[in-house]
Amino acid sequence: MMPKHVIALQPFIMRWLLCSLFVAWAASETINYEPTLNFRKTYEYKYEGVVNVGRGIADLAEAGVKLQCTFRITGVSLQTFLLQISDVEFAELNGIVGESYFQVSPSLSKHLTAELNRPFTFEYSKGQVVDIKTGPEVSNTIVNIVRGILEFLHVTVKTTQRVYELNELGIHGVCHSAYAVEENTADKELYVTQVVDISNCIQKAAVYSGMTLAEESKNSKQRGENVIATVKYAYTVNSTDTGGVITKASAEERHHFSPFNVKGGNTKVKATRNIVLLKVMNTIGKPVTGHVKSRGNLMYKVEKGLGPMPVLLINVTNPVSKISDLIKHLAEDNIYHVNSATSSNILALIQLLRKTTYDNLELLWAQLSGNAEHRRWFLDTVVEVTDERVLKFLRSRFKAEDISANEAGQAILLAFNHLSAEPELAEMAKEFLTIHFSKSHFLLWNTVVLSYGSLLYRMCAGVNSCPVSTVQPLLDMATNGLNKNSEAEMVLALKALGNAGHPLSIKTILKFLPGFSVKADSLSTRVQSEAVQSLRHLAVRDPNSVQDIVLTIFADRTLPAEIRMMASTILLETKPPVALISAVAELLLQEKDLQVGSFIYSQLRAISRSRTPDNQYLSTACNIAVKVLAQKFGRLSYRYSKALRLDWFHDDFLTGTSSELHLLRNGTGAIPTQIISKGKLHFIGRILQLVEVGVHTEGLKELFADIPGSTGHFGKADFTAIMRKLLDWKSLPRNKPLLSAYLRIFGQEVSFLDLNQDVVQLIIKSLTASKENTIWKIIQNLQKGISWRWTKPYLLLETRFMQPTCLGLPVEMSKYYTALKAITANAKAVINTPPKENLRELLHADISLQTDGFSGATQDFIVFNGINTDLFQCGLQLNSRTVTALPWKIELKKKAKEWNFEVNLDPCKNATELLSVNSNIYAVSRNIEEPSSAKMTPMMPENTNTKQSFPKYEKVPDRFMFSQVEDSEIIHPKLQFCSESIVFGTAFCTRAEAKRAHYLQEYPLYYFLGFTEVSFHLEPVMSINAIEKIQVQIRVGRDKLKPKQSQMITPTLTEGMIAAPDPVISVKLLAISPNEKLLGYEVAAYYTLARQRNDMELIISEVAEEGNWKICADLSVDRTQEEAKGHFKWGAECQSYEIGLNISGAGLTDAKPSINAGVNWREVPSFIQVIGKRMREYFPGVSYVMGFSQKHEKNTDHEVSVDFVASSQEGFDVKVKTPKLTVYRQGIPSPFELVVDESDDSDD
């Protein structure tokens, strides 16, 4: 019997038990979708990953790969799991869509099975894959494939929100994800959809290479993209007692790529992944993981050095013998001609060199350096080894001094500019600044210092913090030069600092800028100018600091005009805001130096009209400033400093160019103080500074001022006086150059030259009497006979962009541009009488020079888009090859004391291709296990008929949007024609063929994707007579005028020709045949210089006595009337046809300057009449589209005239009159200022 107190508690106990049971039941019914793996279970999944690369259009070729396998996930501990992969099958696709299918590659499947069978472990908790481990011998390629498999587990599930967004780590990096979830309560399933914008990542698992020197343009990106990539994931999650289990997972990823704007057509990479849960089992036994090492998280890892080139796949085992053999074969194949069939081996050679060790490089040098050809090939290609091995190799050469200064300069220039931009490598490269051999020749020393600066620029662009230790040697060099007052040392150091653009160099550069340092005020203008120019890269990297510096310099009116103008140029490179441009305008309104005012005003005006994206906002600010300044500076003539600019940009192409010419003056005289010409290429969101050339002429201007009889306007008297002064080279200033010039490529200064006393002495000595100079030795060797060979391979461009797909396979977009140039020349001279003491004796000798040889080049441009690994490649590949060839066999003769020359050529005996251009786009597939099975299928079938219709296809008109476009047709034009000369037995032939899939809405991409072939060649044809040789006779000066020629001179020239009836130059082109009369043509040019008029005439006539066919062209320039008249006549005795031309500038001095030009004709051939008729048909429509108004009225017959009137400083009016139509337009914008010469000489 229970106690009473227990009986009393019984109801409460029952209630507690019922409550506990209810809670337990409720807990058993709770649904949990958070992805979890039970460490006591084994999960078996089926995996399939597919990649297709093509245009996404039926009947065009595409390439693809498919990877299938089964994998098991087994628990090792609570959060550690083992991945085991089996049943691996690899298949390739290459061919026409709908006609070709995936084919299994047994060899590569076996290779992948061996690699993937190794154990992989990973940490997993709450839907996040944290750490992946495997053996250290497993390659990055295999680990990345595993990442692609495991990514299906990596998902963030939130059941409290139907839609949510977050930034999370995945295989593509830390990217923005958008989630949507939908629950199926009946089946306890959750459907999760995840979309990742791969282009919008905080941290990208993408790599750019080779584009550091091309500045990014954010404004250009706003106008369009050339790459768009998105991925969509779908998961099915089942709720279990322990959490959510992913039963199905799929992914679909799309990459759209175009060399232009993707809206105008693109190639497509589509990657899909499907994973299905097969079964779940209890784990039996303890899993064995073996020795594993951490390989990082789920983010894709890039192979060091970017891995293999995507355009070829070669076995790189035992590279030394392969490199040696390749170099020997390439050298032999390209001695007497360029073998274009082997030019692709240049990339294979570079790939092998990149896979060899430093010790092997030394071994190869020992094997190859003894042969001049092999040595040159090795030195020209080893520089493409872009890591520490090439630095060690070159350091060894410099210390051993077993290469020449010329070889060393070429090697350092390429090696430093192609080296991977890493701080460790920059520290190694710094040693070259202290090696004695670097200073053995001034050109080599300049190259080492400038190239080191270029390396620092690329390094600072690729790292967050740019260490000061790397730039310290250049800072010390500049400071030492300042302390020693060595202008040469200061200039070189500042140029190198300008190349580097190191953020921590500003403090040192300020020491050389006037107004910021006491010493700087006493420095030469040249040093100050170099200091200002050294800020050019910092203007982009640190615009605010640079703006303060250069604005201060510009505002200081005590400084030389050239320095202030250079400062304004740097200021505009910083892309200043409206407020700063307004401040510049205010300063200019009070500017008294018209040279400075004219230059900066012309800069502002040029930018105000700019159409390139980088000036999108700056042009608006400049436009406002120009309106304020126009009244003061708008009519200054070109006697003042000017900045001229031409640019264009096309949104469909995402491409444009800009060209600038700066003429800086500091007073009177025709010679500017400084001339700078530069050009830029704008493409797919980047700006590449192509070439910049600058010439500094201050020393030359001073030379003019010191020379008696010099006018300073580069007339005949000036040249005579200059030559007299230069011959007296000892009197020239030793420390101040007469002329300085520099060359910058891709924004980096690669070379400069100072024409000082030492250089002038070297030039004068080489051209005057001396048996010790180089030219004398060449003349002596020519008489014995010489043979010279030279070949040069280049890797001019290697740009690579790589990002992962959801499969862990990298999709790559790469461009390669290689060139191979070769020259072979044999020559022997016979000189009667040979010079004994002086080279001037050659003027009194008969000379005969016989030479034969070959000059040619092959240029390969390759673009690849697709999957690239060290095991297999698939994608689209554009191959374009340009081949030029010029063989020759020539005999050149010169008679003593005469300016008469004779050139003898062999007639054409064999077909000779002079130029060919071939390009095509292919679907390519390669794998390392079966190199012989590599496929390259033309994207457009070779047997496709013209005008074949294609079905509709997908296109990307906007970001993430797809739509349908109209059908297309294949266009296949062919052209072949020859222009024959039976006189010379030669025909010049042209052959062209193209094939395009034409899509109106895929403009402009369809212009470039397809087959193209163009060639120009010479072919022998049947001649009138058997030709022994073709002879060219050239006579300069006092040949007598033939009577029948004098009859052909037009009446306007007859009077002038009476005083000087001889031609300035006459050329005869003759076919020489044994025992036959001469056949050919003669060209005679006449020129008469009179006080008021210059007369010129050109007569082309047949040499044959019975021939009367001629061409007569004359031009008369009347300087008093500012008028030019010309006639072009041809036919029998120049009487059959005639076209006249007249240009009048009589209105140039009017209030609104004008020019009138007109063309009239008498009789013209029928084909010209046909062309004229077509032009008359199209002219009204074209002029209307261009904005011209029209008036139908009768004008002068057989005449077309054009009137240009400068209606304002900003534009001009145009009126065109044809016999039946007048068109006109007012206010056409002018790219340049329309100014006339003013009387204001206040600056002189």
Image (cartoon, helix red, strand yellow):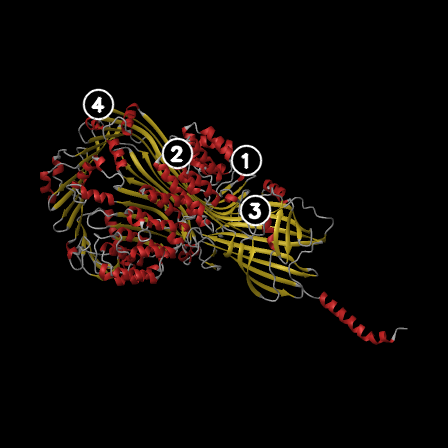
Asked whether the residues under the numbered discs 1 and 4 touch, taking CB atoms below 8 Å apart as contact, a structural biologist would say no
Q: Position of residue 863 (x, y in %)?
A: 45, 46
Name the amino acid, label 2. Glu
**Label 3 CA crowd tier, 10 Å (few <14, some 14–19, many 20+):** some
Q: Earlier in the sequence, mark 2 or mark 1?
A: 1
Mark toward the viewer: 1 or 3: 1
Residue highlighted by disc 4: 833
Q: Earlier in the sequence, mark 2 or mark 3?
A: 3
**Closest to the observer, 1044 or 723:** 723
* Circle 2 Cα neighbour tier, 10 Å, few/some/many (<14 / 14–19 / ≥20): some
- Answer with left or right where residue 87 lies relative to residue 1222: right
First reached walking from the N terminus: tag 1 or tag 4: 1
Instruction: Say which amino acid is labelled 4.
Output: Thr
Distance from disc 1 to disc 3, alpha carbons, whole Å, reads 29 Å
Q: Pointer 2: what residue?
A: 407
Asked if labels 3 and 4 touch by Cβ distance under 8 angstroms, the answer is: no
Q: Looking at the image, how many numbered discs can be counted on the residues?
A: 4
- What is the secondary structure assignment of the residue under circle 2? helix
Say which residue label 1 marks.
Answer: 317
Q: What amino acid is found at the position of numbered circle 1 in the picture?
A: Thr
Quarter placement of the N terminus: bottom right
Query: Mark 4 Cα within 10 Å, few/some/many (few <14, many 20+)?
Result: few
Looking at the image, which residue is at 10% across and 42% down? 1056
Q: Are marks 4 and 2 in contact (CB under 8 Å)?
A: no
Label 3 sits on residue: 102
Mark nearer the N terminus (4 vs 3): 3
- Whether residue 746 is visible: no
The mark lying in front, picked from 2 and 1, is: 2
Q: Nearer the viewer, mark 2 or mark 3?
A: 2
